[in-house]
Image: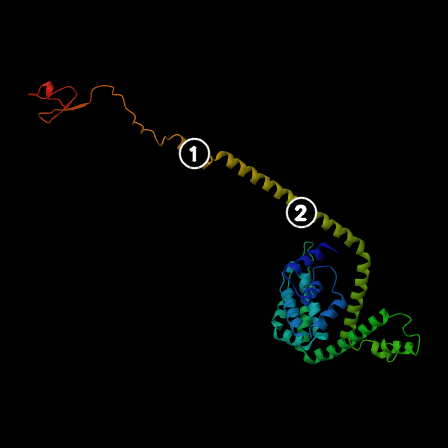
């Protein structure tokens, strides 16, 4: 499993996407290969469900409005849209006609990669083809009939190739098997009836062969990438645990330090109570020794105040208040 696939699976879980939305996201991913025919066929079958139809089309329009650097999202979304128009529910074509302006704007799609290659040319060409197909109802009807026949024949071929080899050896089973495969009764029906059907068959065959080749060649690489992703996640988990352990230790040290610095209120109140004698006489207020004579003196007779030992005229020393 590649890193992009892991990231996509995480997003599917986080955003709680439905089964239909997950299939559309996988078919329109940024992987450098096209969507598989089996996956597009499953999505086309889901368009006949009302709830799944709205989920599928909502995700397709979202992919069509993606940024230039995600040009694969846009191109694959148009490829899937063309497949759904031809083989899915008729409501797909109806909704695409109602929102044809969104497809028309993609005729001016621009994106130049780091190597200077114009990756937007494929998007522009696909947009022109879709607009032409949506505007021509008769052509769409004919291509839809041929595409549905092709899809049915591909499904029969797949089911016939996956059936047991000895299933039709008794009781005329061989004849029924050959007739059901669609290649013995009418050989002309196996050939494409138009250029559009021929292109669709070619796309389906290329997608199926590419899917089988990638599944066989990507298995060891996917295992190595999965082990690498698991080791990275394990290291990050251990790092987070160490950080949390350090934070807890620092917090505990800070709490103990604050306990040591802060005096206990019970001990201080007991010390204050022990210093007070409830049965003893109240302590005398502290006396302040006088360094010299009072700076003022009140005379008993004249009721006047003098500064220091001086006395007013007419008063003797006995006039001073004691």
Instruction: Give percent across and percent down for residue 117.
Output: 69, 57
Quarter holding the N terminus? bottom right
50 vs 148, left or right, is left
Residue shown at the point (84%, 76%) measured from the top left: 190
The residue that appears at 77% across and 51% down in the rendered structure is: 224
| Quarter of the figure with residue 73 | bottom right
Examine the rendered structure and indicate whether residue 217 appears above or below residue 265. below
Quadrant for residue 42, please give it. Answer: bottom right
Residue receiving disc 1? 270
Front disc: 1 or 2:
1
Circle on res. 287? none
**Which quadrant, please, contains the C terminus?**
top left
Please determine whether, in this image, residue 38 is positioned above or below residue 176.
Answer: above
Q: Give the farthest residue toward the left.
A: 314
Element on which disc 2 rests:
helix
| Left/right of residue 70 with respect to residue 300 in the rendered view | right
Badge 1 element? helix
| Residue closest to the far front | 279
Q: Is residue 252 left or right of residue 316?
A: right
Residue of label 2:
237
**Residue 107 in sight from this viewpoint:** no
Q: Mark 1 to mark 2: distance in Å?
A: 51 Å
Residue drawn at point x = 53 percent, y = 35 percent? 257
């Amino acid at each position: 499993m590649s890193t992009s696939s892991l990231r996509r699976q995480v997003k599917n879980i986080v955003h709680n996407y439905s089964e239909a939305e997950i299939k559309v996201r996988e078919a329109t991913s940024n992987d450098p290969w096209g969507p598989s025919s089996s996956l597009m066929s499953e999505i086309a079958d889901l368009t006949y469900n009302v709830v799944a139809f709205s989920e599928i089309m909502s995700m397709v329009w979202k992919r069509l409005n993606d940024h230039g650097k995600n040009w694969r999202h846009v191109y694959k979304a148009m490829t899937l849209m063309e497949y759904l128009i031809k083989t899915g529910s008729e409501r797909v074509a109806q909704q695409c006609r109602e929102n044809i302006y969104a497809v028309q704007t993609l005729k001016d799609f621009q994106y130049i990669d780091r190597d200077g290659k114009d990756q937007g040319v494929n998007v522009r060409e696909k947009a022109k083809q879709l607009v032409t197909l949506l505007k021509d109802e008769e052509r769409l009807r004919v291509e839809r009939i041929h595409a549905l026949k092709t899809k049915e024949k591909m499904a029969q071929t797949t089911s016939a190739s996956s059936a047991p080899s000895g299933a039709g050896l008794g009781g005329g089973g061989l004849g029924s098997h050959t007739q059901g495969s669609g290649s013995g009764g009418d050989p002309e029906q196996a050939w494409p009836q138009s250029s559009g059907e021929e292109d669709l068959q070619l796309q389906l065959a290329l997608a199926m062969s590419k899917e089988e080749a990638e599944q066989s060649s990507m298995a060891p690489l996917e295992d190595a990438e999965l082990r690498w992703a698991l080791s990275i996640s394990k290291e990050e988990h251990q790092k987070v645990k160490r950080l949390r352990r350090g934070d807890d230790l620092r917090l505990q040290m800070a709490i103990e330090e604050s306990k040591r610095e802060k005096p206990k209120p019970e001990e201080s109140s007991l010390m204050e109570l022990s210093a007070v004698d409830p049965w003893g006489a109240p302590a005398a207020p502290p006396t302040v020794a006088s360094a010299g004579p009072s700076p003022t003196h009140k005379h008993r007779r004249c009721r006047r105040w003098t500064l220091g030992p001086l006395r007013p005229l007419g008063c003797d020393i006995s006039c001073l208040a004691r």
